[in-house]
Amino acid sequence: MLRSRPRIVVSRHLPDDVEARALRLFDSHLNTGDQRLDSATLHQLAGTADGLLVCLTDRLDAEAIKALPPGVRIVATFSVGYDHIDLGAARARGLVVTNTPDVLTEATADIALLLMLGAARRATEAQTMLREGRWGAWTPTGLLGTHLGGKRLGLVGLGRIGRAFAHRARACGMEIHYHGPRRQPATLEEGAVFHPSLESLLGISDVLSLHAPSTPETRNLIDAAALAALPAGAILVNTARGDLVDDEAVIAALTSGRLRAAGLDVFRGEPQLHPAYVSLPNAFLLPHMGSATEETRAAMGHRCLDNLEAFFAGREPADRIA
Ligand code: DGY
């Protein structure tokens, strides 16, 4: 069938101006009701589509990719992370995949800062006490947190978000250290100290913050042994992916006090999370909202549309990852 405009399926409700542009550019099937689509429904909707605009809530594993109707030639994911898509299977099928780097860097770094401060300054306990009407008089020794100035921030990954968080942490007076697959050039390090091994980084990190992708190699990277290697009373921050940490080990360390506190925005199996987290007063928790600002979510949507537009115009999409 000859079509004047490419047909795309958008799996979730997106900001209004993004949806309006999607309708202008393409024959777009929108999900304005924002129902989470199971793979059978996505597959069915994809029946006559040329491309998909998906989110991290859509799992495109090898089986799902294999089952995609042959007309689907591109998948644009509304995320920088792409652990929900089997890129190997996509390549094998000749499917182009794009993501949304850059545009969510600052928003996610802001959330990392919020998590670090919330954990260091006992925000969960303070909020609960206040909201439950248990705030007595101001006391000189109540709800004492820990100061960040002069402390060492260990970043697992000095990519875009890690660097943006480092800028904020320097403003708090922190010293920046990092570990990653390779040493970054001095212009990107901006004085951060490179540790060739994770063990070395763990040993000095008063606050450890995760900025690595979820891969088979990084799964459970922060396990009981890693937590034991941190200085006693360290703080853990995670804005990356939940499966980088071993939940049981983190919960045990928070319970014993070996970890002073944790600030977590991402969880294994979200939107479910290990039930013990919610009863831990020293866990400051957010529901995966690193990129959740109006500006950022609009920019992410437009980035997806830019990639789709380039692809259907026969150009190389700027954010191609497969
Ligand atoms: C991403 O883009 O990968 C974030 O986790 C959600 O915005």
Image: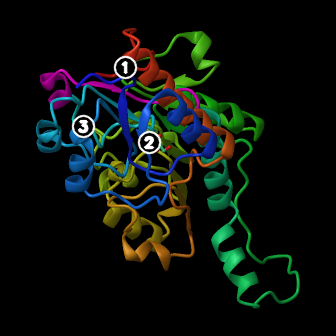
**Residue linked to disc 1:** 320
Q: Is residue 297 left or right of residue 74?
A: right
Instruction: Please give the range of residues in magenta.
Output: 88-104
Callout 2 amino acid: Leu
Q: Residue at x 60, y 33 (%)?
A: 299
* Quarter of the figure with residue 256: bottom left
**Front of the two marks 2 and 1:** 1
Mark 3 Cβ and ligand 1 under 8 Å apart:
no
User: Mark number for residue 202?
Assistant: 2
Res. 48 mark: 3
Which element is circle 3 on? helix
The spot of residue 206 in percent (x, y) is: 57, 47
Q: Nearer the viewer, mark 3 or mark 1?
A: 3
Residue type of the residue flagged with mark 1: Arg
The answer to whether the residue labelled 3 contacts the one labelled 1, judged by CB atoms less than 8 Å apart, is: no
- Which residue type carries mark 3? Thr
Q: Position of residue 214 (x, y in %)?
A: 33, 41
Residue 30 place in picture, x, y as percent? 44, 47
Which one is in front, 249 or 291? 291
